[in-house]
Image (cartoon, grey):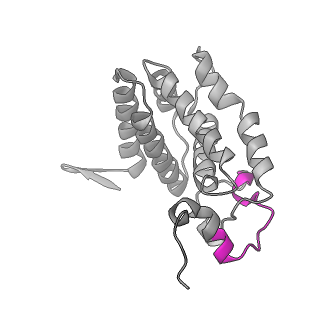
Amino acid sequence: MSSTGDETIPSSQFHMSSVLAFLEESSRRKEIGNTTIERAVSETMTLYRALKEEGNKAPGSFRADFTRLLNSGRNPVGISLYGLNCLIHAQRGRTDGFPSACVERSALQIIADEFMDWEQELDERIREELEDFEEIDETIREVSDEAPPFRENEIPGWIPSSHWWWRAPHQQDMSETEREDRLYYDQYDGLETPG
């Protein structure tokens, strides 16, 4: 629950307002970039968790506003960049990209499943990013042979069980040393070990 002045409102109501405000702001941005859409997506995931905890779904009126705003201004470009970042992270999935690819892939799927009003006329870039995940999924499958696995306790509890990519790595028994070497390889690159 969140408090605003004298009244207490459900957490999801607060987050719905925040998501729409972030989308409104990002739609008006003049520069091309994805930091504002990333904030909107992050807040959307917080909203999803709040709704899940409350046992609720996003109301149709929110989905209509969400879709209208996602479809406006710079947001189609922003969501395209977000999808591209997910693909780039998936391509780096054998090393440090896998965790980010999973988070971003789940965000895209949750937006598509829980928040879109698919009856609205949409910019083609929105449909492209939120209806067809084949290239990202294929890339995740390709890198799964050597991707550093998540430990079961590292997978957020709010992630739907249908999000298979979190458990896709083939080497679930990868040693912690190898896993850390893969995840943090760029930090270790160039460092010499003593001895």
Displayed quadrant of residue 88: top right
Tell me, yes or no, if residue 68 can be seen here: yes
Q: Which residue is drawn at 60% across and 21% down?
A: 125
Nearest the eye: 172 or 46: 172
Q: Residue at x 66, y 24 (%)?
A: 128
Residue 119 x %, y %: 62, 19
Residue 175 x %, y %: 71, 76
Residue 31 x %, y %: 36, 23
* Quadrant of the snapshot with the N terminus: bottom left
Q: Which residue lies furthest to the bottom in this view?
A: 195
Nearest the eye: 169 or 23: 169
Q: Count the numbered circles shown.
A: 0
Queried whether the magenta region covers residue 170, the answer comes back as yes
> In the rendered view, would you say 120 is above or below 93?
above
> In the rendered view, would you say 85 is above or below 131?
below
Seen in the image, is 133 located left or right of residue 115? right
Q: Which residue is drawn at 81% across and 62% down?
A: 170
Q: Residue at x 60, y 67 (%)?
A: 154
Displayed quadrant of residue 19: top left
Q: Which residue lies furthest to the front in this view?
A: 195
Queried whether the magenta region covers residue 178, the answer comes back as yes
Tell me, yes or no, if residue 151 can be seen here: no
Q: Residue furthest left?
A: 5
Magenta part of the protein: which range? 163-179
Residue 25 x %, y %: 34, 28
Seen in the image, is 133 located left or right of residue 55? right
